[in-house]
Amino acid sequence: MLFDNARLRAGTDARPLLVCDLTQSYSPAGGGGISTYLREKRDYVLQQTPHHLLQIVPGPADRVTVNGRHIFAEVAADPVSGSPNYRFILRVRAVRELLARYRPDVIESLCPWVLPWVAIQHRRAYPGTALVAGYRTDFPNAHVDRVARALFGPLGRVFYWLSLGYTEMTYREFDWVYTLGEEARATLASRGIERTEVLPLGVDTTLFHPGARDPDYRGELGLGGSGPLLAYAGRIDNEKRAATLVEMFRLLPADLDAAMVLIGDGKLRQPLMAAAKDLPIAFPGFETDRAGLARALASADLYVSAMADETFGISVIEAQAAGLPVVGVASGAMPARVPPTLGRLGPVGDARAMADNVLALWRGDHQAMGRAACAHVEANFSWQATFGRLFGTIYPKALARAAGRMESRVEGGPVKGPVHPR
């Protein structure tokens, strides 16, 4: 087919686009922010655009499910050790074959490992493809540095510097990169990556709101007490520093009569359940029903998180939408999500400071703070705005750069571009 360079230069499309999401970070029974993003994006594309959406994720077997304009392609992958809800694709040939079969106009890479380079290799074969990357995790700090230091001590810092080189080499290949906040954008700029935008995420405020509160929820968990119910939702693992939450809870005074629920799964869930068997802490596992999660959050009193490397914190704004003040740490994206009017932040890894902040919020006007948190989310975060910016600004910039690349290679002749067998 002939590639319409003028159409791409203008950032518009005379026909519907085929957009591809490509990620390792998906789980139907344990997914976090990216799984939520994939689901919300699917709904946006199908309900509010003429475009087609191909989503390639790891799964138990190779399987392609077509539902109208939505193509959901699972690539067989083994479970991740210690995180059985997640799988990791190593069969890059299967991914390459899917991309070559559908030839999307835009590939959006949502995670840093293996798959970005599959997209880059596909673009080398089909140079008219626009590549967009979401830099959604500060993985040199959150993944590489933390693990390497635990394994190798101070020598582990070498792996951190290597990961920074990998970041620079990988993301410079993309036509456009979005981050979830200005801090991450500045990090990329320091590595010479300049084609960037900030893309705030959203929350479904029709689902997550204080009206979902259920006074029976605490009892259903088998938790008593008349003090605050603390809640956390996310992976229960080392990256999220879930052990700090249990340590914090032990430091709360007994007369506070508090309870806590840790919603999610992960490799620390069973060990922490054993360690906290003498405490009023519930571990109900991953909540597969979004309405159930909204009910759980709205039925709590305070949201707690010890995660130090959040690049956005979608679970935090879902809790705020449900009317909860937040106790967190002064690191990553948390200061941007939780100003002093909406919660309290303390040093990373300081369980005592976190316990003190829980007490301060509970003994203050936490209900007024919860109302302010809900109003803040309603005014500033929506999926409509997120995807409007993605399709209206970021994709057009990437497509325009792809068009320029095509012009420099072949002027007016047939080239390999997207072909959609639909």
Image (cartoon, rainbow, N blue to C red):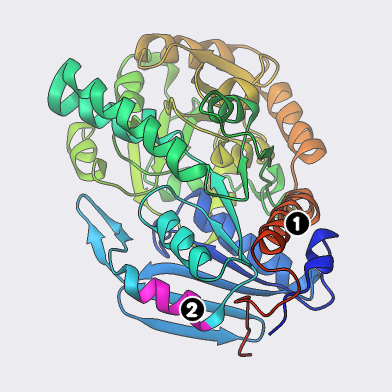
Residue indicated by mark 1? 400
Q: How many labels sit on residues?
A: 2
Give x and y (percent) for residue 319: 60, 38
In the rendered image, the residue lying farthest to the left is 152
Amino acid at pointer 1 = Ala
Q: Is residue 194 magenta?
A: no
Label 1 element class: helix
Question: From the viewer's perspective, is 182 left or right of 164?
Answer: right
Which stretch appears magenta? Answer: 94-101
Residue drawn at (53%, 47%) of the image: 296
Give x and y (percent) for residue 101: 50, 83
Label 2 element class: helix
Residue indicated by mark 2? 100
Question: From the viewer's perspective, is 344 left or right of 121?
Answer: right
Q: Is residue 100 magenta?
A: yes
Amino acid at pointer 2 = Ala
Query: Label 2 near label 1: C-beta < 8 Å?
Result: no
Question: From the viewer's perspective, is 90 left or right of 336?
Answer: left
Q: Is residue 153 above or below residue 396?
A: above
**Front residue of 6 and 391:** 6
Residue drawn at (41%, 62%) of the image: 118
Alpha carbon distance from label 1 to label 2: 21 Å
Counting residues from the start of the chain, the first of labels 1 and 2 encountered is 2
Q: Is residue 224 above or below residue 308?
A: below
